[in-house]
Structures are given as C-alpha cells and as structure tokens.
Amino acid sequence: MNDRQKLWRKFRQKWLRDDVGAKVHEPPWTTPERPLCVWPARRKTRRVVFLSKDYVYYRWVGGGLSVPPDWMVLSRIGVPDEPQMAFMADLHKKLRVPWHYIGDLDTLDLTAFLVMRALNIDFVGRRHALPVTWLGINDTWLALCRRWKDPRWRISFGQMNPLEPEHWSVLREVAPELPDTIGPECTRLLDCGQTLDLAAASGGYKPGFHPRLMKHLVATARTSRRP
C-alpha cells in the first residue's frame, strides 16, 4: 500500500469515527431507506447523468427545460454504498455509454465522484471502473452564476465545517487531478474554506440562466473525454 492509499484510509476512518461521535462532518453514507432515483431516457440511452441532489432534475422539469431525450438521469445523495455501486456496475455493463456527475462543490460530492469512478470506497490507486466525468459545479458553471446573478441577491457560498478543510487537503493529495477537474477558481474557493451547493448554484438568477446552463451541460457532456 502506498502513502496516498494509507493517507486516504486513515482519514476515512477518522471521518467515520467523527461522524458517529461529534457530528462535525457530513456523513459519508445515506440511509438505506433513501432510494436511488432513476429517470429513464425517452430514446436510446446515450449518456447517464448522475445528480447528487434530485431537486436539480425537478427544477429542470419544473422550469420547462427539455432534458435531452437520450439522457438517463440518476440521483441519490452521499457516497455510493455497495448495493448502489453494484447496480451502477451492472448498468454500465448493459449500456456501455459515458457517465457524468453533477454535484455540490464540496468534499462530500467530490469524494462521491471519486468513489463512483472507481466503484470502490478505497478509490486511491484503483483503475477507473466507471467512465464518469465531472460535469459541475466547475469554473464554467460558476462563471455563469456570476454573469446571470440577480443583482438583488448574492451567491450563497457556504463555509466548511471543522473537519472539511482536512478532508479537502487529503483529497488534494490523493487525487491531484481534482484542481484541473473543477478549475482554478473553484479550487481557490475550496482552499479558502468555501463551498457551493447545487441549490445556490441553481436558484436566484436572472431569466435565461437555466436554458444557458443546460446548453453548457449538454455541450460539455458531448465533448468530455472518458477518464
């Protein structure tokens, strides 16, 4: 086992212990009662898009946006558990299409992305078992938020909880590709202890924001390379 693998396992054990005790960090697992939501593609599935928050999908649909008909959309919060990873592995085996992840700009969803990519909670040093790419929140999404911000409101950045700076430091070490994945501005926000969740990155913007965001997501998904 190399140093990065040891570092991740040591932190993961601390994360689990502190979550049970002091409740200073978001839990890595969701309860078994929270189901994985699946919205099948209306045509032949060409892409699977995973959302860490299901309200993103409802905001799309409620706002009258047309989700691409060849997208299958999945959603469930938290780090994938073993049954969920088994389901995704089987789905990938059947479909053989690119996957994309849309999540909060925080350590929980970045970890979930890395775990999903490896289909293993100990993702460090493992092969990419699932062809999933990070679709946002990233620098381009953040730039759209700033460009379309309603002047009456501020973008609601969050503050990291007590364990999260250490979590981010560990992720930077064990997954050094993350700054390039999310972009330099998003990296700077996390370095400064700030986060941005999907609710704040999806609401409170001028008319036209959501169609423009969807256009960006569709274009990025089409041009993104498999990991």
Image (cartoon, rainbow, N blue to C red):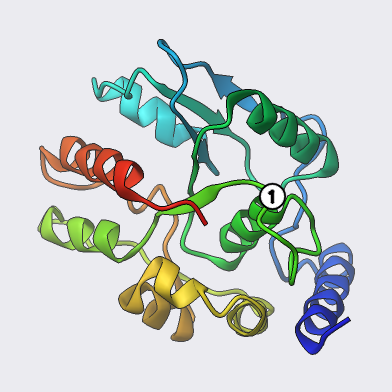
In front of the other: 85 or 127: 127
Q: Is 164 located above or below residue 83 in the figure?
A: below
Mark 1 Cα-neighbour bin, 10 Å: few <14, some 14–19, many ≥20: some
Question: In this rendering, would 224 be left or right of 125?
Answer: left
| Secondary-structure class at tag 1 | loop
Instruction: Point out residue 58 in the picture as x, y percentages from the top left corner.
Output: 41, 26
- Which residue does the numbered mark 1 point to in the structure image? 129
Q: Residue at x 68, y 30 (%)?
A: 93
In front of the other: 112 or 203: 112
Residue reaching furthest to the top: 42
In front of the other: 150 or 190: 190
Instruction: Point out residue 98 in the picture as x, y percentages from the top left corner.
Output: 49, 39
Q: Residue at x 49, y 28 (%)?
A: 73
Amino acid at circle 1:
Ala
Q: Is 10 located above or below residue 139 in the figure?
A: below
Q: Quadrant of residue 124?
A: bottom right
Q: Residue at x 38, y 82 (%)?
A: 188
Instruction: Point out residue 101 in the picture as x, y percentages from the top left corner.
Output: 50, 47
Q: Quadrant of residue 10?
A: bottom right
Q: Is 176 located above or below residue 154 in the figure?
A: below
Q: Residue at x 41, y 78 (%)?
A: 187
Instruction: Point out residue 193 in the picture as x, y percentages from the top left corner.
Output: 49, 81
Total numbered circles: 1
Residue reaching furthest to the bottom: 3
Question: In this rendering, would 14 be left or right of 46?
Answer: right
In front of the other: 53 or 89: 89
Pick the quarter of the image with the N terminus. Answer: bottom right
